[in-house]
Image: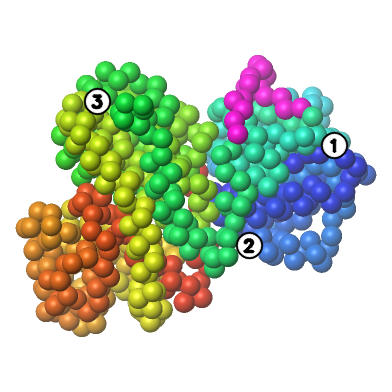
Amino acid sequence: MCGIVGYVGDHQPDARPLEVVLEGLRRLEYRGYDSAGVALVTGAGGLATAKKAGKLANLVAELDARPLPGATAGIGHTRWATHGGPTDVNAHPHVAGGVALIHNGIVENFAVLKEELLADGAELLSETDTEVVAHLLQRAYAEVKDLGEAMRLVVRRLHGTFTLLAVHEDHPDTVVGARHDSPLVVGLGDGANYLGSDVAAFIAETRRALELAQDQVVVITPRSVTVTDFDGNPAEGREYTIDWDAAAAEKGGFRSFMEKEIADQPQAVQDTLLGRTDTHGRLVLDDLKIDESVLRAADKIIVIACGTAAYSGHVAKYAIEHWCRIPVEVELAHEFRYRDPILTERTLVVAISQSGETMDTLMAVRHAREQGAKVLAICNTHGSTIPRESDAVLYTHAGPEVAVASTKAFLAQITAAYLLGLYLAQLRGNKFADEIAEILDDLRAMPEKIQEVLDRSGRVREIARWMADTSSVLFLGRHVGFPVALEGALKLKEIAYIHAEGFAAGELKHGPIALIEPGQPVFVIVPSPRGRDSLHSKVVSNIQEIRARGARTLVIAEDGDEAVKAYADEVFFVPQSPTLLAPLLSVVPLQIFACELATARGLDVDQPRNLAKSVTVE
Ligand code: F6R
């Protein structure tokens, strides 16, 4: 939700700041693509800006037509609109006097501040909350003549969420930043420093990063990074090395990032499983700041997450309840927080988030901790806010996920949830060591099976292309197949803009079956016939019910399940696996289906309309 990048380097004014900032924006564009803009501090002691509605390509075309002068520092922004439509005028940066400022978040008290500025004679051009902050900063700077101090004065007046970056025409060697409930990281270079909403902003330049805490102001020059809290007290960030490189965030020959990330899934699962056992074969988790006795005593687990991450939580529920015999609830983070949930010190809250910055999930984490619950985060982004604020972390190792639609992070989240379930079973004595080892072996076999699903994807791609004009697709599943159905529908909605619904197969006859008319395509995720037999036969009956009403059935079934063939218009077989682990396989054809169909429709699968990768507003 808005991408932010800042650069300052120790050199004569030249093209480098613009190059670095544009490269950063290219890598951050998945965070928002309603508009893009840059501001540079030029050698002549002036500011140069350019901004354009629409995708980054529009800004690049503008810069080609009207090049900016050389510079020593720069900031850049890619926007997901909140206040004010996606127009050139509302695009960031916003300039006030010698200040140029960019913003991610929402300033909730902007109306009051705007009134105050207008009464004082300020001329505001846009409808944004950000321009108000630019004017406040310009006025504060005029008083104190220190950019860091001016920023501290301003942020203390703001309510809401924000990451702010600013430059001033009098300071060609400085970029100032501030964060409150929105992400900001520092990149440490040699004779140059960087700021970004996430490390992708500067991964092409450096893998050394500095994590900032909430409510901090940072001033970077080419050779210094100064961090304080909002009151000016010195603070220090935590330095770390980014464990992936720029190549990991490139398409690598695939048509889209989504296609590449689907193909990355065997690796994502394998890396998430790597190094999880100690020398005695016992499971260990990362960064566990909770006493094991607390986990042993937990009498309820509540999983909080949004979107795809929440569906991984649904899969977790089946596995954890089965293995550990602890009740697990799964709740959308934005609902959880406002319903006065019952939390005690024996409740373990598991927050699942790829980005670690989803505001709804972050707020739910804070609420849970305020109520005395312990929070364990499952997260893909090191140093992000949710793991920082949690009592324990289990990192997924999916690598950078760039496509807006989540794929490899989903599989990695499910894998991490299995690990958590097994860890709890080990700790609480619900399972013997050899039982856990057996399930771990099954898990370790999954990457190869996922690869097999990928290798067999020709037919599902063909069907997807053939169905490019379809207007509605339904998805049915039972047990762990139910969240898979929900995820299959979400993928299709978000990237192909097709009406899609996922249902629990048993629910169909309670209403949704009325939707079935001749030709209606329905994906059905069929559980293993080797598992609980009743489950398999119930789903086969559900297929018959819809087929009798004319549905076109597209069935995902396990190798060897000959029984479904008679009822399916099309079967996509996946390798055999234990029932609880099957979502790692059955969701893959659905991801491929959505990606291929959206591509066939000529859509931008990586940057679907109205969406942004990291939802940092509530
Ligand atoms: C869907 C998708 C979203 C995210 C959700 C949570 O493809 O990507 O539904 O899963 O916004 O995001 P994180 O996991 O970053 O908290």
**Kind of residue indicated by mark 2:** Lys
> Is residue 604 at least partly visible in the picture?
yes
Magenta stretch, main secondary structure, is strand
Q: Is residue 199 left or right of residue 426?
A: right
Circle 2 — which element?
Answer: loop
Residue depth check, mark 1 versus mark 2: number of the one nearer the observer: 1
Circle 1 — which element?
Answer: loop
Q: Position of residue 51 (x, y in %)?
A: 72, 57
Q: Position of residue 494 (x, y in %)?
A: 42, 62
Q: Nearer the viewer, residue 520 or 457?
A: 457
Q: Earlier in the sequence, mark 1 or mark 2?
A: 1
Q: Residues within 10 Å of mark 1 (few under 14, many from 20)?
A: some
Q: Residues within 10 Å of mark 3 (few under 14, many from 20)?
A: some
Q: CA distance from mark 1 to mark 2?
A: 30 Å
Residue 95 within the magenta-colored segment of the rendering: no
User: Label 1, on which residue?
Assistant: 10
Give the numbered dot on residue 427.
Answer: 3
Who's the residue at 68% across and 47% down the image? 204
Q: Which residues are magenta?
A: 224-241
Q: Is residue 262 left or right of residue 383?
A: left
Q: Earlier in the sequence, mark 2 or mark 3?
A: 2
**Kind of residue indicated by mark 3:** Leu
Q: Earlier in the sequence, mark 3 or mark 1?
A: 1
User: Label 2, on which residue?
Assistant: 55
Circle 3 — which element?
Answer: helix
Q: Quadrant of residue 196?
A: top right
